[in-house]
Amino acid sequence: MRHGRDYLMGKVLRLWNIAYGSVNPFISEWLKEHKSMWKLLSRFGWSLLLSVYVASILCGLLVAAFVVSGFVMRYLVEEPIRMEEALNFDYTKNSPVAFVPIKGLHVIPPNHKLQVTVMLTLPESEYNRNLGVFQVRVDFLSAEYRRLASASRTCMLQFKSMPIRLLLTFFKMAPLVAGYLSESQTLNVHFSGFTEGDEPTACLKVTIEQRAEYRPGAGIPEIYASSLILESELPLVKRILWYWKKTVFIWISMTVFLMELVFTLICCRPIILPRVRPRDGSASGSATQDNVLIQS
């Protein structure tokens, strides 16, 4: 097998030498005839190669600037908290209560202003219309279930007279019968003015308070569904950074890119601008010019 391999390699080399020897004179003749064109093509190829090299170096510096800017923005910009949870009220109590724990990624930093929105979907039943105004209270509780803050708001179904209700029912008869619409209203109860203190909030307590004139267990609205939205408002400087985070990211990236470029040009200039060895023609031309200047 070794002898067979050596024999085949010898044959291939012999054929290559014969082909190269027969073609070489033609190549030499063609190069002599098109010498200027060959020089032009070689210069163009060399310039294109240098352009691609410099562009790749600049792209690498730009990508590195974006990466550095991303790390800076990660620790510089703070995201406001927004959480939405469904409420499950305990109707075994005279005033139904629902708890919403705050944990994990939803830990509220100090000095953040908070806004709570309780959304209640109520049927437009005769009981709810006759109930009228009812009260919703939100309590901020610590990990030991100690009350940190509290607020209460009143709400009721939007009033509609009998002719208006009949007219709306007539116009919405088809989707109501098909089940695409329901005779209900969604109330959004907003609570604001809270500020997170040094002791973190661990839980929110939502209570539908009983009307005072009703007997125990009565005076509570009928509810289809309910949910709670908690939103935090960042301090002024952090809020500006959050709203302008894309612009800040671009500015930091461009600043880092310019610093990298200046550092590379000053300390590592051959990397981004490699030295090109002068050609023979240019060298001889410069030497001839120097001799003329010396003689003059």
Image (spheres, rainbow, N blue to C red):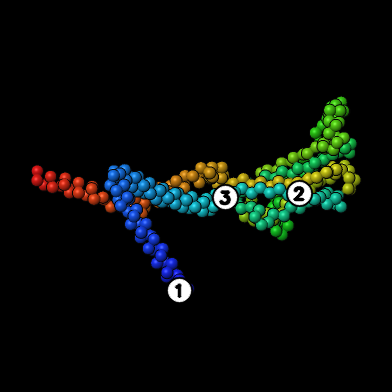
Q: Residue at x 85, y 43 (%)?
A: 222
Residue at the limit of the structure toward the bottom, as seen here: 2
Element type at marker 3? loop
Report if residue 208 is visible in the image. Answer: yes
> Which label belongs to residue 78?
3
The residue identified by callout 1 is 2
The quadrant holding residue 40 is: top left
Distance from the alpha carbon under mark 3 to that under mark 2 = 26 Å
Q: Dividing the image into 4 quarters, which one contains the C terminus?
A: top left
Residue 39 seen by the camera: no
**How many angstroms separate mark 1 from mark 3 (CA)?**
71 Å
Question: Is label 2 in a helix, a strand or a loop?
Answer: strand
Mark sitting earlier along the chain (2/1): 1
The kind of residue tagged 1 is: Arg
The residue drawn where x is 61% and y is 52% is 110
**Considering only order in the chain, which callout, 2 or 3, is on the residue closer to the N terminus?**
3
Q: Quick one: 129 or 163, which is closer to the camera?
A: 163
Drawn side of residue 42 relative to residue 174, left or right? left
Q: With 151 as the anchor, is 12 left or right in this view? A: left
What residue lies at 32% left-to-right and 50% top-to-bottom? 26
Residue corresponding to mark 2: 86
Q: Local crowd at mark 2 within 10 Å, few (<14), some, or many (≥20)? A: some
Disc 2 from disc 1: Cα separation: 80 Å
Q: Position of residue 173 (x, y in %)?
A: 86, 31
Kind of residue at disc 3: Glu
Which quadrant of the view contains residue 16?
Answer: bottom left
